[in-house]
Amino acid sequence: MTLPAAPPPSPALRGTGVRSGIPQDRRRRRPPPALAPLLAGVIAGLMTSAGATSHAALHGASEPMDARADQPWLPALIPVAHAARTDAAPVIDGVLDDACWAQATPIESFIQVEPLPGVAPTERTTVRVLWDDRALYIAIRCHDRHPAQILARQMRRDSNVSADDHVTIILDPVLTRRSGYLLRVGAAGGRYDALVEDGARLRAEWDGTWIARTTIDDGGWTAEFEIPAAGIAFGRQDGAWGLNIERVIRRRNETVRWAGATRNRKIESPADAGLLEGIGALDPGHGLTVKPSMVGTMDLDADSLRGAPSLDVFQRLSPTTTLAITLNTDFAEVEVDDRVVNLTRFPLFFPEKREFFLQDAGVFSFGGLRRSPIPFFSRRIGIGPDGRPRDILAGMKLTGRERSLSFGTLVVQMDEPRDRGQRTLAVGRALLNILDESTLGIIATHGNPADPSDRSLVGGDLNLRFGGLNGDRTLEANLWVQGTHSGADLANRDPVAFGGRIAWPNEPWSFSAYAARIGRDFRPALGFTERIGRHEYNANLRRRWRPDGPIRTIDASIGGNAWTDLSNRLESGSATLPEFDVTMETGDSLGTSVLLQREVLTGPFNLVGRIPIGAGTYDWTRLALRGGTSTNRVLAARAGASVGGFYDGERRDATIAADWRPAAGVLLSAEYQVNDLDLPSGDFIVRIGRLRFDAMLSPDISWSTLVQWDNVSELLGLSSRLRWEVRPGSDLWLVINHAMARDDDTWTTGQSEVTTKVGWSFRF
């Protein structure tokens, strides 16, 4: 059955019509358990006593009335769209001149989220959806009465297209209401994609197989999508999908959305998506993808040439389960890390950038933890005991979702020097969906990439999320516990870590609190922990105002964190009292903060490896000021400075950066950072410079160059990468890495390599 086109809804209504045949559990969110309304009532009563600030209409309209404001437990109306079957697939070129698009029922009922929630959009948006046996097709027409003002500059894959006019699609093919896919396209054709996990967490590391093309004309701009069935997980049976669509008109900083149009719920929340009906059984083929690759590297210093083949195989065992196998894995095309100088006495955390480990990485996330103490940190794999890279001989990864269970298993065989053979590392993870948006999980790891001793870890986590509280608010909580076991030569008396977090991420008030205990013998060989044998505490509170006029938001926040020993004696503590941030309607921002810091050192250490800091108690205060112009501008700048104490001396920091976008697909950015340390035991200035040049010859051909330098290592590094995505999954790479070292006033050439890589996907 095809739905007729509906006129834009009244601003007083937050949804569109509901198909009466929709099962009840899809038409409304089930009431949360008794604990949730009790907590929500207490929190909401404390935090909404001042009421939400009303907003005068930017274009002369007044704040609309919410039809459900006085009855928050009424079921929210879920908008429904219909996908039409086509026998002739459209040509994906950003031009909607294919006759098949006339078969699709238009979706036009969009509502503002920003700057005026509930108000009709300033420009029309029309969406159409088609499908055939092999793919889903979506066309989004963004009408615009002033097309010359459309911001369209970014074309690079996985770039920040949010600085341009753009559209975002959320797909939940299995209708889990908690996970799915995010696809985003800018007006210039730049693409960004991510997995949605745990109700709203984005995993931007995922790179899906899909096509999008855009065009701009006298009436606005158009985005046309092809999403192959072989590239997404879906149920074979006929049934509704979750769908949501959002458009951003960047020059006005206006956001409009089809479903769930509220500030407290983001586009990446599948629970707030509408329904897409009419899609029959798609055919992903045999679900087998074979991708052989060949890498050739020329070492210009040694005048040598070496090459190696690699192979990646992906087999879809079911619509929602995939087996991946990699042999002789190569990471020649991986982008280098940003240069950082460590001004602390603790290890730094660098994000994973290798594609094999990034794909489906979300299933291995644990307890809502972002950094420490995470049980599995894939960058540990491929690093030997001496800190140098080791080859990965083979790897196997099984990830999927069956009914209410999500799971993942990763096994990797890492090369070792000849006298040590090989080393096998493994991790397993399972998550069971409970309630509406919550999960209960376990994780286990085995192996030690940096030490001959055996190490294992087992952990469990409970992740609670209650949406729709007190209207559209959300309450989140995480509880977790981990335990490690080391070889007989290491102590195992206190190998347990446990903790929890609670958060109210809403407006006008938001807060979070976190506490953890990390045992003194807790050693996650495949994880990351900043400190062991410690307690960690953290809390933050923010109040947001939305005044009338040129200011969009004013944020006032306070927070603090503390590290103590296991007897709760303070070792490190900081407090921000207070912090203010102002964001203008134009997107420009300004902020300031005061930081109070205490460090209790039980022993000396060397700062930057050369300035001794003695044992003792140190207290200092720092004042920070920061600001930036909107990324909408052709030339966008940002700067920050802080002054104040640092241990028993003083420290002055400054950062200045600029992004210049002179034309579509061209970005030149520069950043310079200075840390000026003035201590009784020595003075030192840290300088880091960074230049980046990105050029897009087309949405499929990108050239990115990064030049970095710092005065601690005295290394100047250049990394230049040219990528041609011939077709989805098939790429050609040219990578140049060059390093130079300075000794006094003399520069000498270090590593200098040119690498080519060809990877080609064959789908069956």
Image: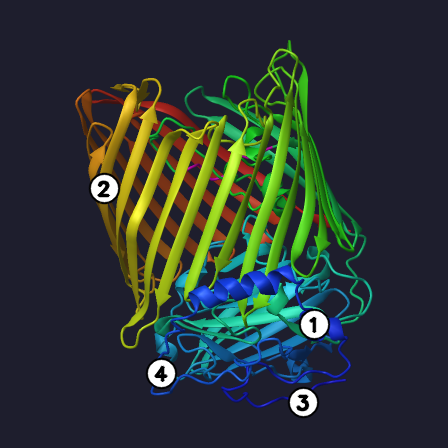
Q: At numbered mark 1, what does the secondary structure look like: helix, strand or loop?
A: loop
Residue 137 visible in the current orientation: yes
Q: Which residue is mark 1?
A: 89
Displayed quadrant of residue 474: bottom right
Q: At numbered mark 4, what does the secondary structure look like: helix, strand or loop?
A: loop
In this rendered view, identify the residue nearer to me: 496 or 381. 496
Q: Which residue is mark 3?
A: 4
Q: Going from the N terminus, do you reach mark 1 or mark 4 first?
A: 4
Q: Which residue is mark 4?
A: 57
Which region of the structure is painted magenta?
A: 330-337
Given this view, does label 4 or label 2 mark the residue nearer the observer?
2
* Residue at 25%, 55% in the rendered image: 627
Displayed quadrant of residue 636: bottom left
Q: At numbered mark 3, what does the secondary structure look like: helix, strand or loop?
A: loop
In this rendered view, identify the residue nearer to me: 310 or 604. 604
Q: Going from the N terminus, do you reach mark 2 or mark 1 first?
A: 1
Separation of disc 2 and disc 1 at Cα?
Answer: 61 Å
Mark 3: few/some/many CA within 10 Å (<14, 14-19, 20+): few
Separation of disc 3 and disc 2 at Cα?
Answer: 61 Å
Up the image or down, 156 lies above or below 446; here it is: below
In this rendered view, identify the residue nearer to me: 585 or 605. 605
Q: Please state which amino acid type lies under the numbered disc 4.
A: Ala
Up the image or down, 650 lies above or below 252; here it is: above
Q: Going from the N terminus, do you reach mark 4 or mark 2 first?
A: 4
* In contact (CB < 8 Å): disc 2 and disc 1: no
Mark 2: few/some/many CA within 10 Å (<14, 14-19, 20+): some
Q: Going from the N terminus, do you reach mark 4 or mark 3 first?
A: 3
Separation of disc 3 and disc 1 at Cα?
Answer: 23 Å
Tell me the tag on residue 622: 2
